Image: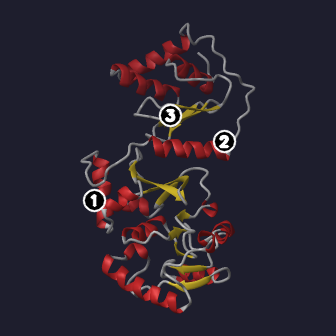
Amino acid sequence: MSNNKGENLAKVLWYYNLLPDMKAYNQKIICPFHEDVNPSMIIDLEEGRWFCFGCQLSGDAIKFVQLMEYKLNKSNDLKAYNKYLKILKSKECSDIKFKQHCKRQKPPDRELYNQAYDYYYGLKKNDWQNDSGPSELIDVRRYMMNRGFDLSTLNKCRAKITYNKNYPVIFPMLDNGKFKGWVCRTTDKEIENKRKYLYNEGFKRARTLVGDYGKKDYVIVVEGYMDRLKFIQYGEENIVAILGWKMSAEQIEKLKKKNITKVISALDNDECGRKGTEYLKKFFKVTRFTYLKSIKDPGDMNEKSFKKMFERTMKKFIENGGNKNGSSRQNKK
């Protein structure tokens, strides 16, 4: 039996008719362990490991056989291991030699983008208002409602359920309608203390403005994705999330290219939010969102407090020369 982990994994995948190419270390295949529409399983034949972005399963050649044999024949681990040994010695696989001269390369940005795209759009579309299951959907629905979100808002933002128990809800990151990646949110308080959000590999925060902008000569700016959802829920579409407290040079340039000259800063009601607001004043005419003292960020708003703060903010915005319905010069042409 070969001691090469990558070669053994190649033989196993070849046996199950899942390996399309014997000449590349890094490959992507349809995952056989969940209802995969687009390839979401990453194969690493240098390390002899595999990982699925969809169902979050991972392992080596032996683990793969264990899962396959349980799925196909309900075999226990001992029987599966014996099957693994037979695969390596089988007529179909005994002569397979993986091309060791192949060089390992880091996946390019385009490949990482395609993986993120395939993962999100490969997940089942959920109707948050009417679907009764799976249990993960019910749990996430309860969590989001407890945070003050309407189920119609989850449908509107195209939220879906993932196969990752730690980060069960996923949102697409759309920059003026263009898919840039995804973000998952944990609903577990213990995990939240360590890391609230999980972004896809290769996602570029600095190059992305999450939201719709350019139809008016101003835009409302918030920090996080969930902050933006609250504004959307209360009827405001002209809003972007910068995914941090300080707008990047690329994000600033995106707004300028759309002839946006004014900004309403709804960055968090804390020290970082105030610093981010001062930074925006270097590039735009800025009106600060009028937070109530009890509100730390948009996520804390309910409909009543939102209306009060929004009315005060827009009054100040108009006093500063803004026009709530103002169109950009680009759209006036």
Q: Quadrant of residue 88?
A: top right
Gap between marks 3 and 2, in whole Å? 20 Å
Image-based side of 245 in relation to 76, left or right: right
Residue toward you, 301 or 65 = 301
Neighbour tally class for label 2: few under 14, some 14-19, many 20 plus, Cα within 10 Å: few
Which one is earlier in the sequence, the residue at label 1 or at label 3? Answer: 3
| Residue with the mark numbered 1 | 142
In this view, 332 is above or below 313: above
Is any part of residue 261 visible from this angle? Answer: yes
Is any part of residue 168 visible from this angle? Answer: no
Which one is earlier in the sequence, the residue at label 1 or at label 2? Answer: 2
Gap between marks 1 and 2, in whole Å? 38 Å
Residue at 47% of width from left, 29% of height from top?
A: 63
Neighbour tally class for label 1: few under 14, some 14-19, many 20 plus, Cα within 10 Å: some
Counting from the top left corner in percent of width and height, residue 136 is at: 32, 49
Residue furthest front in the image = 333
- Quarter of the image that includes the C terminus: bottom right
| Residue with the mark numbered 3 | 59
| Amino acid tagged 3 | Gly
Counting from the top left corner in percent of width and height, residue 320 is at: 55, 91
- In the rendered structure, are the residues bearing label 3 and label 2 in contact, judged by CB atoms less than 8 Å apart? no
* Local SS, label 1: helix
* Local SS, label 3: strand
| Residue with the mark numbered 2 | 107
Residue at 45% of width from left, 89% of height from top?
A: 315
Residue furthest top in the image = 91
Image-based side of 277 in relation to 224, left or right: right
Residue furthest bottom in the image = 319
Counting from the top left corner in percent of width and height, residue 178 is at: 56, 54
- In the rendered structure, are the residues bearing label 1 and label 3 in contact, judged by CB atoms less than 8 Å apart? no
